[in-house]
Image (cartoon, rainbow, N blue to C red):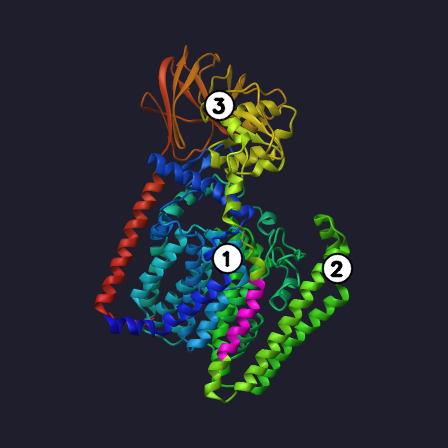
Amino acid sequence: MQEKIEKFIKSPSFIAFVVFFVAGLVVFHELLLVGKVFFSSDAVSARAVAPMMKEYFFETGDYPLWNPYVFSGMPGFHALTFTLFAYFPHILTLPLRAIGASNFWIYFGYFLLAAMGTYWLVRRWTSQIPAIFSGLAFMLTPFLVAMKTAGHGSQMIAVSFIPIIFYSIVRMWEEKSLRWSAISAILLGIQMQRAHIQITYYTLILVGIFSVFQIVKMLREKDKETGKTVLKSSLVPIGALLMAAVIYLPVYNYIEFSTRGGSGGGTGLEYATGWSFHPAEMLTFLHPTFFGGVGDVPYWGWMPFTHHTNYFGILVLILASFALANRKTPHRWFWTSFIGFSLLVSFGKFFGLYELLYKFLPFFNKFRVPSMILILLQFSMAILAGIGFQQVIEKFEKKPTFTIFGIVAGIVAIVSFWLSQNYETIEKFGQMAMQYKVSVNQISSIFWQAVSKDGVISFFIVILGLVAIFWTKNDAVKWKKLGMIFIGLMLLDLWRIDARLIEPVDAYEMKKPFKTTRLIQAIKKSRSDDTYRVFPTGKMFTDKRWARHRIGSVGGYSAAKMQRYQSFMEREPFAQSNVNQYLRMLNVGFIIGPNGKKWQPFEPFLERAFFPKSVKSVQNFDVALDSILSPNFNPKSVAFVETNREIPSNSGQGSATLLDYKLDAFSYEVESEIEQLLVISETFFPHGWVAKIDDKLTEIYAVNGILRGIIVPSGKSVVSMEFAPSDVKFGAILSLSSFLILLILVGFTFRKSPESEV
C-alpha cells in the first residue's frame, strides 16, 4: 500500500496537480484563504431566486418546478432557474457545503479540472513541462477567470469540462475504443447537465469537426475499422443527450413558448449579435489593454457592458504560432481550421459566417454573444502552445525562432507607439468621459498609463523569452530551466491581467442586497399572505431580489422569458394612461419607488382570483392583446378568452377564498350562483399545469393574453391547480438509467481489458 502511495505521489500527473494547485492558491488566495467573494450584478441576480427555492425545498420537501416571483410567474426548472440535483456532481459538493467551506473552493476545483484536462491532452504529444505550461495557460486565461468574476459560474464550469471531454474524444479515435466512447459520453453528459447550453453547443462543434477530420483520415488510409469506430463514436452524443435528458427534455418543450423560440424561431439576429468581436479587437491577442476593459481602464471596443480582455498570453501566442507553422504538429489542419472557424464565428455581425449559421444550423439561432466562442480559440492556443514549446525544445532553429519572436515584438512595439501618438484623439474617449462624468483628459490619462505599462511588459516578456531560448540552446540540462523560465514569464504575464479582474469583497457585501429592509418588513406586515405582487419602477423593475423575500414581482430578469409576457411588455402597458388597470389585472398590491426605498400601497387592489362581469371570446393571443390594450379596458368588467367554444356568461358575483398556496400549486374554495369564468392572475403556460374542480380535471383557458381562467360550476367547489409536467420526471428516469448503463459499460471494458494509461 505504501509503495502505491509513493508511486502516486511521484507520478507526473500528481506533480502537475500540485503545481496547478499552488499556482491557483496564489492567484485566488483572497477567495480561498480569506473567504472573500466576487460581487457583481449577475452574481447578485443569481443568488436571488435559486437559493430561495432551495430553502423552500428543504423546508417543505416539495421540489418547486415553478417560479412565481419573477414576471408574474414563469417556469423555474424549464427555464433553468432552479435545477437542484439535475447536475449529478452537485452531490459530491455537499460535504464541502455542509462544513461551511467557502463556495469558491468548489469553483477552484473546476479551475483545476480545466488545468488537468489540458495537461493530460497535451501530455500525449509532449513531455512534462510543456504540458504543465499548457495547463496553467488555460486555467489562468483571463476570459475564463472573468466568467467567474462576472458571476457566470455555470458558464465557467461548463468550459472547465472542455479539455477533459476533448482528451477522451482524442483517445476514443486514436484507440478506436468503446471504453473511451462511454467515458466521453459520461463527461459530455455531465457538462450538458450543467445547463449552459451555448457552451455545450460549441463543445459539440469542436468534437464534431475533430471527428470529421478523423473519419476523413481513416477513409484515406483505408482503415478497416472505420465503420466500427464511427459506430462507437455515435455512442457519445446519444449517451450524453440521454444522460442530460432531465435538463434538455424540459428545455426543448419550453423553448417554443419562450423568447428563445416563441417569436420567429429564436432570438432576433440583431439582438443575438450584440456582443460581436470586431476584427480590430484581435489586437488584444498581442496587447491586453489595447481596448481597455481591465481594472480601472474603461472598455472602448464594440461590445456593450464588457469588463474583460481576450488576451491569452504573449508567449502562448508565440509558441502556438510555432506549432501551427510546423508540419509535424499533431492534428495541425484540424487546429488551424477550428481556430479560423472560431474566430470568424466570433466576429458575429462583422462577418457573414455567423448569419449563415444563424439561418441554417439547427438551434444556433437560440444563442447570442458570438464572442463567447473565443474561449475555445483560447483553449486551442493553450494546447498548441505546449506542442510548440516541445518543438522548440526538440529542435531549435535560429531563423524561424528569430522570425516569430521578432514579428510579435515588432507588432507590440508598433501598436504601443501608435497609441502613444493617438490616444488623446480616440473618438470613443469623449463618449466614455460623458458616461463616467469625468474629463476626456482623465480618461485618456488612465488609458495611457495602463496601455503603456502593459505594452512595455509584453515587449520585454518577448525579449526575455528569446534570450532564454538562446541561453539554453543545445544544452539538455538547461532546457528544464528554460521550461521554468517560460512558465514563470507566462504566469507573470497572465497574473498581471487576472489580478486586475479579481477584485473580491468581504462576504458580508454579498449579503447586503438581501437584507430584510424596513420596506420589506412593512410590505410583509401589510399582508397576511403572499398572494400579491409588487410593481418596481425605474431601474428596480429588472431587480430579482424581491424573490429572496418571497415577494412576487411583475418585473425581473430572465434570459428566456415567456414569449406571451414579453409581447405584453413590448407594448409598454405601464406607460399607458390605463396603467392602473394592468396593475390590477396583475394582482399588484404595492408600488416600489425607483430607488427601492420608498413604497406605497396600490389601490384599488384586485385579488388574485376574481369573477369578471362579462366574458368575450377571441380567436388568438394577438386579438386578446389588442383588446386589453384599449384605453377602456377594465379586468373586473370584461375578460377576453382565447377559445372557439361557447362559454357561459358571467355575472361578476361570487367569491374565491385561498385554501393553500405553494410555489407550484394552489387551491381555492369557490362559491358562485351560476356557472361562470373564474380568472386567476397567474401567467398562462399551456405545458404542465393541471386544473381540477373537486378533484375532476378541467380545462385551463388563456385569459387576457397572459392570465389563466377556468369555468367553475354553480354552488360551492374546490378549485386547484398544480404544475406537474411529466417531462421532468421522465427526463430524470432517462438520465439516471443511461448514466448507470454507461458506468456498467465502462466497468465491463475495464474488466475485459484493464490496461489504461492517462
- Nearer the N terminus, badge 3 or badge 2? 2
- Front position in the image: 190 or 26: 26
Q: Residue farthest to the front?
A: 34
Closer to the camera: disc 3 or disc 2? 3
Relative to 98, say whether 603 is above or below.
Answer: above
Label 1–label 3 contact, CB within 8 A: no
Q: Identify the residue position indicated by label 2 in the image.
A: 426
Q: Residue farthest to the top?
A: 673
Relative to 286, say whether 536 is above or below.
Answer: above
Q: Residue at x 47, y 63 (%)?
A: 24
Q: CA distance from mark 1 to mark 2?
A: 36 Å
Q: CA distance from mark 3 to mark 2?
A: 56 Å
| Mark 1: few/some/many CA within 10 Å (<14, 14-19, 20+) | some
Q: Could you tell me the amino acid type at mark 1?
A: Glu
| Mark 3: few/some/many CA within 10 Å (<14, 14-19, 20+) | few
Q: Identify the residue position indicated by label 1 in the image.
A: 30
Which residues, given as a range, are shown in magenta? 483-498
Left or right position of 616 against 219: right
Q: Please state the horizontal and vertical placement of residue 467, each as a whole percent of the image.
A: 59, 83
Q: Please state the horizontal and vertical placement of residue 746, each as a whole percent of the image.
A: 27, 62
Q: Could you tell me the amino acid type at mark 3?
A: Arg
| Mark 2: few/some/many CA within 10 Å (<14, 14-19, 20+) | few
Secondary structure under tag 2 reads loop
Q: Quadrant of the N terminus?
A: bottom left
Q: CA distance from mark 1 to mark 3?
A: 43 Å
- Nearer the N terminus, badge 1 or badge 3? 1
Q: Residue at x 24, y 58 (%)?
A: 744
**Residue 260 in view here:** no
Q: Please state the horizontal and vertical placement of residue 611, each as a whole percent of the image.
A: 47, 17
Q: Identify the residue position indicated by label 3 in the image.
A: 527
